[in-house]
Image: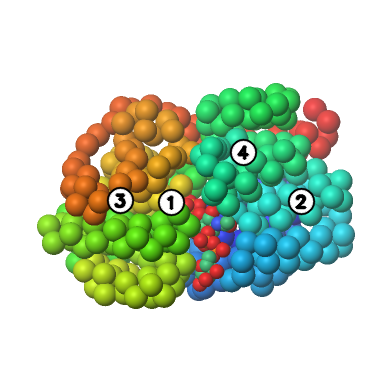
């Protein structure tokens, strides 16, 4: 059985490594890895391949840095060429990025079955590029691997046949378990930054709704700076955000916090685990906060990971008042215990289901 996996953005490297490992452990499976190039900086791409032992991509398409339309269109054309050459049994796509949609579209138009990992998530905010990417990918897919029960319900409500949907848990939970020990052993980040466990707040920010709105971006950065006067705020800055901050003349606000370059996964795990609170608009980071039982303030109006809000670990904050945001960041809380993301075996379940579906079981 031949599978083409399409990846391209930071969170996809972390999701795909889990499934790749499970696939490659099965006899008779050949995985062809396609990196679209959507993320291309060393610390947004290569570092993950190195640290997580991700196999070298078989194809690197080098497509990134454009608009959504440019990226998606160019990827579609280039992925189609790969698929025509490789003639795989499946195309495997992850999450909700432009690389996900391009991979799914290229495959369905060639009548190659598509499997979508992290299917069924919704923010119900159609202004988000990710929401469009997810919905279209789900509807183009033949196998939909849902991370949560909520995701399964979303898919059923949209009329996706139940025999295409499999609740497998969250591959990011698999990754958190798999790399926990390696992170503890290898990461020196706390010492390097002079941080005390539970003595700092970790922040990340990259969503269009926060970075592309000048007022909102300024308000959030002002909140970070206010908090930093009381508790250090460590802020690994996404390149998209860095560019916006510079273009809007807000660079001086970054001097008010501990702004660093994006870090590798192992350092990120240690920063997350030891934070007293995480403030973020990232999807993956919200869940990782829960894996390490760290309270999370989500700097958005809505979240796809609604179970975290229900359990009390995650609070939403879309305030336009920097004082209010800073006050919320300085609070601390705990939520209820539950197990919404599976057993840490999502990668294996996905690999096995792909095989059994191909054989017609
Ligand atoms: C993308 C995904 C988003 C995901 C995020 C993870 C889409 C629509 N969005 O957002 O869902 O949460 O990745 O991080 O696919 N840039 C660099 N170097 C890089 C990568 C990006 O400089 O290595 C800059 C470029 O100016 C680029 C901009 O960031 O144009 C945006 O990158 P893009 O991949 O389009 O979207 P993200 O905001 O990273
Ligand atoms: N991450 C990382 N270094 C960073 C920021 C994030 O390794 O500097 C990891 C994080 O631990 C998580 C993933 O990247 O596993 C989340 O990616 P991101 O926030 O870019 O995207 P999203 O999850 O919002 O799509």
| Residue 279 vertical placement versus 164 (above, below) | below
| Residue 320 vertical placement versus 361 (above, below) | below
Disc 3: which residue: 320
Q: Residues within 10 Å of mark 3 (few under 14, many from 20)?
A: some
| Residue 219 vertical placement versus 296 (above, below) | below
User: Which label was assigned to residue 282?
Assistant: 1
Q: CA distance from mark 1 to mark 4?
A: 17 Å
Disc 4: which residue: 119
Which numbered mark, 4 or 2, is in the foreground of this view? 2
Q: Secondary structure at mark 3?
A: loop
- Residue 328 x, y percent position in the rendering: 22, 45
Q: Residues within 10 Å of mark 1 (few under 14, many from 20)?
A: some
Residue at 70% x, 26% y is: 159
Q: Secondary structure at mark 4?
A: loop
Horizontally, is 64 left or right of 299 in the view?
A: right
Find residue 349 and report its image quarter. top right
User: Which label was assigned to residue 105?
Assistant: 2
- Residue 195 x, y percent position in the rendering: 20, 62
Find residue 202 and report its image quarter. bottom left
Residue at 44% x, 40% y is: 303
Q: CA distance from mark 2 to mark 3?
A: 38 Å
Q: CA distance from mark 3 to mark 4?
A: 32 Å
The response on whether ligand 1 sits within 8 Å of label 3 is no
| Residue 83 vertical placement versus 294 (above, below) | below
Q: Earlier in the sequence, mark 3 or mark 4?
A: 4
């Amino acid at each position: 059985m031949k599978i083409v996996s399409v990846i391209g953005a930071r969170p996809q490297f972390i999701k795909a490594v889990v499934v790749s490992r499970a696939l490659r452990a099965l006899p008779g499976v050949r995985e062809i890895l396609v990196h679209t190039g959507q993320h291309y900086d060393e610390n947004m791409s290569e570092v993950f391949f190195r640290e997580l032992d991700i196999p070298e991509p078989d194809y690197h398409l080098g497509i990134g840095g454009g608009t959504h339309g440019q990226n998606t269109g160019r990827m579609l054309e280039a992925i189609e060429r790969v698929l025509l050459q490789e003639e795989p049994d499946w195309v495997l796509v992850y999450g909700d990025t432009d690389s996900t949609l391009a991979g799914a579209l290229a495959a369905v138009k060639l009548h190659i079955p598509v499997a979508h990992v992290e299917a069924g998530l919704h923010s119900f905010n159609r202004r988000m590029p990710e929401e469009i990417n997810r919905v279209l990918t789900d509807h183009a897919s033949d196998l939909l691997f849902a991370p949560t029960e909520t995701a399964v319900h979303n898919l059923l409500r949209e009329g996706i046949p139940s025999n295409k949907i499999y609740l497998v848990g969250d591959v990011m939970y698999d990754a958190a378990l798999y790399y926990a020990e390696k992170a503890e052993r290898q990461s020196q980040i706390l010492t390097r930054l002079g941080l005390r466990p539970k003595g700092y707040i970790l922040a990340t920010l990259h969503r269009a709704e926060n970075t592309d709105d000048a007022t909102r971006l300024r308000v959030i950065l002002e909140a970070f700076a206010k908090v930093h006067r009381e508790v250090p705020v460590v802020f690994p800055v996404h390149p998209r955000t860095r560019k916006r901050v510079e273009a809007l003349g807000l660079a001086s606000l970054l001097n008010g916090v501990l702004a660093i370059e994006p870090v590798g996964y192992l350092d990120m795990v240690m920063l997350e685990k030891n934070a007293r609170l995480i403030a973020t608009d990232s999807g993956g980071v919200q869940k990782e906060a829960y894996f390490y039982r760290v309270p999370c303030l989500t700097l958005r109006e809505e979240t796809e990971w609604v179970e975290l809000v229900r359990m009390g670990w995650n609070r939403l904050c879309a305030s336009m008042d920097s004082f209010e945001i800073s006050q919320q960041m300085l609070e601390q809380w705990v939520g209820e215990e539950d197990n919404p993301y599976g057993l840490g075996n999502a990668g294996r379940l996905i690999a096995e289901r792909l095989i059994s579906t191909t054989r017609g079981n």
